[in-house]
Image (tube, helix red, strand yellow):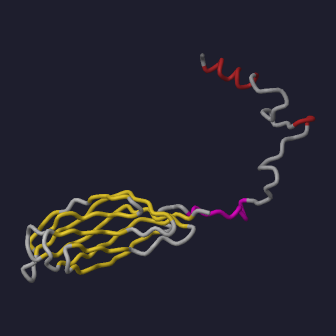
Amino acid sequence: MSNTQIGIFLRRGSPRGSRAHGRGSAGRPRRSGYPGVTNTSASPVPNKDVDQRGRSAYQYYSNCTSQSGTCTITFPAVPAGQRLIVEHVSAIVETPTATMLNVVQLRGDGIYQFLPYVGVTSNYSNQYSYIINDGVLASYDAGQAPAIDAFATSGAAFTTLATISGYMISYP
């Protein structure tokens, strides 16, 4: 179809009684704007994007010390009317030996995400550090609480420090 044919179709192809030619029904001139909306550009209809990621940013830090081989950090439960989207986990696990850490996971409401870690020699106290710095995608509804678990092979004491970050979404 050529450009000329398209132009003819658009001009002639409009249904009868449409406002394509600047006239409404019964030959009245077409009104500008939307029916029933009286706001002008000087006083626009107020709106806001409450689900925009940056509007409700979330970041929470916590830590724990284990004496039994398991260290669990439970973050605050999501408030009513909200959903938490976790996009990043950053953590460090300090252990007395280099071969001690087994698993680090983000969990909540029956969902488990196993987090990769890298072992490095610590700069102080003859400790070994395991670094977690991972992008994730996890959602938690109202009343649910995200948690991070670190499991070690021995019963020696170790420490975990963790931060989760993301954003909150409001819903009715």
In terms of image quadrants, where is residue 172?
bottom right
Q: Position of residue 142 (x, y in %)?
A: 51, 67
User: Of 20 and 102, which appears nearest the observer?
Assistant: 102
In the image, is residue 152 part of the stretch drawn in magenta?
A: no
User: Of 93 and 55, which appears nearest the observer?
Assistant: 93
Residue at 60% x, 16% y is 1
In terms of image quadrants, where is residue 162?
bottom left
Q: Position of residue 56 (x, y in %)?
A: 49, 68
User: Of 74 and 90, which appears nearest the observer?
Assistant: 74
In the image, is residue 47 part of the stretch drawn in magenta?
A: yes
Q: Residue furthest right?
A: 26
In terms of image quadrants, where is residue 9?
top right
Q: Would residue 136 appear left or right of 56 to someone viewing this image?
A: left
User: In the figure, 26 relative to 47: above or below?
Assistant: above
Q: Position of residue 16 (x, y in %)?
A: 83, 27
Q: Would residue 116 appear left or right of 138 to someone viewing this image?
A: left
Q: Residue furthest bottom?
A: 125
Tally the marks: 0
**Which residues are the magenta region?**
41-50
User: In the figure, 46 relative to 3: above or below?
Assistant: below
Q: Position of residue 76 (x, y in %)?
A: 43, 75
Q: Main secondary structure of the magenta part?
A: loop
Residue at 21% x, 63% y is 103
User: Of 97 and 43, which appears nearest the observer?
Assistant: 97
Q: Would residue 13 appear left or right of 124 to someone viewing this image?
A: right
